Amino acid sequence: MNLCIQCPRECKTDRESKTGFCGVTDALSVAKIMLHEWEEPCICQGAGAGAIFFSGCNLHCLYCQNCKISEGERGEIMTDAELEEKIIELRDAGASCIDLVTPTHYTERLIRILRSVKPRLNIPVVWNSSGYEKAEVLRELYGLVDIYMPDLKYYSAELSAKYSHAPDYFTVAQAAIGEMLSQVGAPRFDGDRLLSGVIVRHLVLPDCRRDSIELLERLRDTVGQPTNVILSLMSQYTPDFYIQSHPDCTHRALCRRLTSFEYNSVLRRAEELGFEGYFQNASSASSGFTPEF
């Protein structure tokens, strides 16, 4: 019996026969494979990023925009060999990278797959995660991942407990980002195309601007020079996904859109701290940018 402890939840589930906290067994469940044009520009040049969306998630945020798959309800079971074949097909279709979306709960399987397929790729592998990952497990990905793209969601333990049932979120994500940076170093480009590095995503939430500012200040301490990472500061929060799951609007802040004042105040602080990267305008706050699953 192999009890799962590969993510910080350490739910100790026998995922050969049962679903873990992540909502899936250890069988690879893939919700969608596509050329994705709406990722950060530096990883979706040309035909787009070769995105592979995995079913399930070890975080389960209340406002998840991919809620149709994060609960593990949708997905096609694939063997390791079948997924390797799909990765090669994406490469051949002109993908600018292989974008592994929400991969954390399949890390052990993906290590084996990447060891096999990586020598046949001439494009970067992107680890597109929630940031809620064990640094010691990420260490096993050394040499297999070129670009890490973690979320950094909250600084406050109260917020992360309330919205993602993970009061230790920041401490865990901070250590994970430190490990990612130690593996791939500062961003390295070929023209406009990112070859390796860390992109840290942060979604500013309604009524959370002070937490976002504190988070950015702590992030700067974590990474040393702010230009050691690329910051993707997002304003795309939409209450659509939260209200679908919680029509009673238990958490009132999540039932409204982000204001320009909230986002711009966080953006100003990011600039003062010396971060460089991407920011969004209000038109991005739409469910229309979320792939259909």
Image: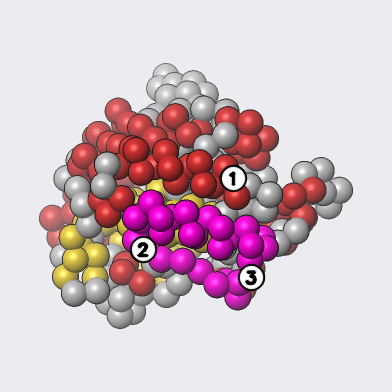
Q: What's the amino acid at mark 1?
A: Arg
Instruction: Identify which amino acid the numbered label 2 is placed on.
Output: Gly
Q: Nearer the viewer, residue 167 or 49?
A: 167
**Relative to 244, 3 lies left or right:** left
Q: Nearer the viewer, residue 256 or 207?
A: 207
Nearer-N-terminus badge (2/3): 2
Magenta span: 258-284
| Left or right: where 258 falls relative to 95 | right
Q: Residue at x 67, y 63 (%)?
A: 259
Crowd class of label 1 (few under 14; some 14 to 19; many from 20; radius 10 Å)? some
| 173 with respect to 80 (left or right) | right
Query: Is residue 198 visible in this depiction of the protein?
Result: no
Q: Position of residue 184 (x, y in %)?
A: 20, 47
Quadrant showing the N terminus? top left
The label shown at residue 286 is 3
Q: Find the distance from the CA under tag 1 to the CA under tag 2.
A: 21 Å
Q: Could you say which is closer to the camera, residue 279 or residue 101?
A: 279
Measuring 19% from the left and 66% from the top, which residue is drawn there? Answer: 189
Q: Residues within 10 Å of mark 3 (few under 14, many from 20)?
A: some
User: Which mark is in front, 3 or 1?
Assistant: 1
Q: Would you say residue 32 sits in the magenta stretch?
A: no
Q: Which residue is mark 1?
A: 210
Question: Which residue lies under the disc numbered 2?
Answer: 277
Q: Earlier in the sequence, mark 3 or mark 1?
A: 1
